[in-house]
Amino acid sequence: MRSSIARRAAVFGSAALLLLGPVTASAQADPVEPEVSDQAAALPVELIDAIQRDLALSPDQYLEHAELGQKLAEFAKIARIQFPDAFAGTWLDDAGNAIVGVADGADEDAAVAAAQGAGFQVKDVAQSESSLQAQLKTLDGWLDTQPPAVADLVRGVTIDIVNNGLVLRADNAGGLQLPDFLQGARVVQSPATAAPQPSTDLAPIAEVMPADALLGGDAYGSLGGGIGLRCSLGFNGTDNSGGPVNITAGHCDPNLAAAGTADASEAFALATGGTGPRVGTFAKTSLDIHDYAIIRADAGAAHRFENNGVRVPGAAPLAITGTADPVVGAPVCKSGLTTGYTCGVVKAVGQTVTVGERTLADSFSTSMCALQGDSGGTIVTGTQALGISSASNVGQYPVCQVADVVTFVLGESPELFATPINAILAENPGLRVRTS
């Protein structure tokens, strides 16, 4: 069963290359000179506090690093096509420097020249990205030969871009004996779901809905199949007919099989003291591969979703200006009903990992704390939408301070897994995130 994980990772990696289309931009770009002061002035104070607390960055530095990450993402799309034998990935280092990995290959000199011409630093590494992708296929073949007791230990696999190797996630890292060709791979603990909060008191009331808007990060309740859950709203958007929607997590739908039907789960705004009237229903839910749900607003509540804001519940909003792709080392911040804003960096991209009985593919992981109730909330880089909170390795703890201590003792750190917003949009033609 688990042997399909590496295969899915390889397939998603190959598909990414095919979807890039013709190269229309030159890799010889001007040196990067971000200009972000105007944006920094518009960041809400709660987000600034989280950036300074968790990242030790000023607002300007946070935005500069986020912008550099997206420039690296654009460069990578071109480099994978133009320099397949030498290109070995892109990332931001701890100091915020933009790095391009280059391996020995026929197009090495051209790759180095392009990276340096774009204003990036070059790091020599042993293996190209295509070579590491080939190792994923080899791993898949090896897992196919293993008994279930061994193969089922592997819960995920990804390329470690910074360390130029593979990372395997396992339920019992100590019980996995790797073959010789994988002796250099790191083995780490697999994640658990960043679960919604169960609720037994979710029911509509007949009072008139308050007029104030609903934003990404605000609390909502879902009710379906006799089960109630508390989650965080994701990004507001519009569907292919222009109707208002919210993009949140699929595992926040308690009756996912009924999504889009008359029996679909219902969504309710939550406020201090109880549950408000219904604001929408789950129009589409995906749990395996990509974890997301699309809540279609009811006609009477449509105006509440017609904004592009993200916030700590009840606070001033961050205006979303576009969408972005995850880049290792890029700064990220999430909002959610339980922990508010927390910030970190992207740790891995293009990741396939098993969470419970479901598989997340093409996901990314971050060094952020998320707890029960944060599920479905927004992840941003700079002022751009990046992903939807899906799974965490510390979701069971009561507060992030406890999670920090426990994971430190275990030699780990909090980690939040997410579904890229651009993957969700690509899977749903016509779906858009609201932007300013």
Image: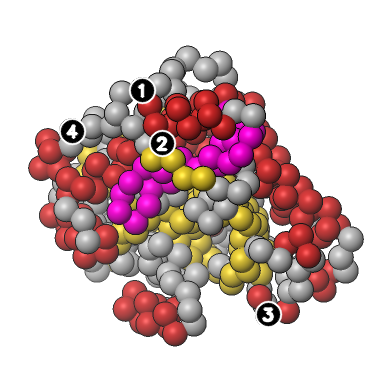
Residue 244 location (% of width, % of height): 37, 33
Residue beneath the point at 79% across and 66% down = 179
The amino acid pointed to by label 4 is Glu
Residue that numbered label 3 is attached to: 174
145 vs 214, nearest the viewer: 145
Q: For the C terminus, which image quadrant? A: top left
401 above or below 39? below
296 vs 119, nearest the viewer: 119
Of labels 3 and 1, earlier in sequence is: 1
Residue that numbered label 4 is attached to: 35
Of labels 3 and 4, earlier in sequence is: 4
Q: Is residue 197 magenta?
A: no
Of labels 3 and 2, earlier in sequence is: 2
* Element type where label 3 sits in the image: helix
Q: CA distance from mark 3 to mark 4?
A: 48 Å
159 vs 382, nearest the viewer: 159
422 above or below 134? above
Q: Is residue 96 visible?
A: yes
Residue 346 location (% of width, % of height): 42, 53
Residue that numbered label 2 is attached to: 72
Q: Is residue 315 visible?
A: no
Q: CA distance from mark 1 to mark 2?
A: 11 Å
Of labels 4 and 1, earlier in sequence is: 1
Residue 434 location (% of width, % of height): 32, 32
Q: CA distance from mark 3 to mark 1?
A: 47 Å
Residue that numbered label 1 is attached to: 29
The amino acid pointed to by label 3 is Gly
Residues at discs 3 and 2 in contact (Cβ within 8 Å):
no
Residue 144 occupies quadrant: bottom right
The amino acid pointed to by label 1 is Ala
Residue beneath the point at 43% across and 18% down = 26
Q: CA distance from mark 3 to mark 2?
A: 36 Å
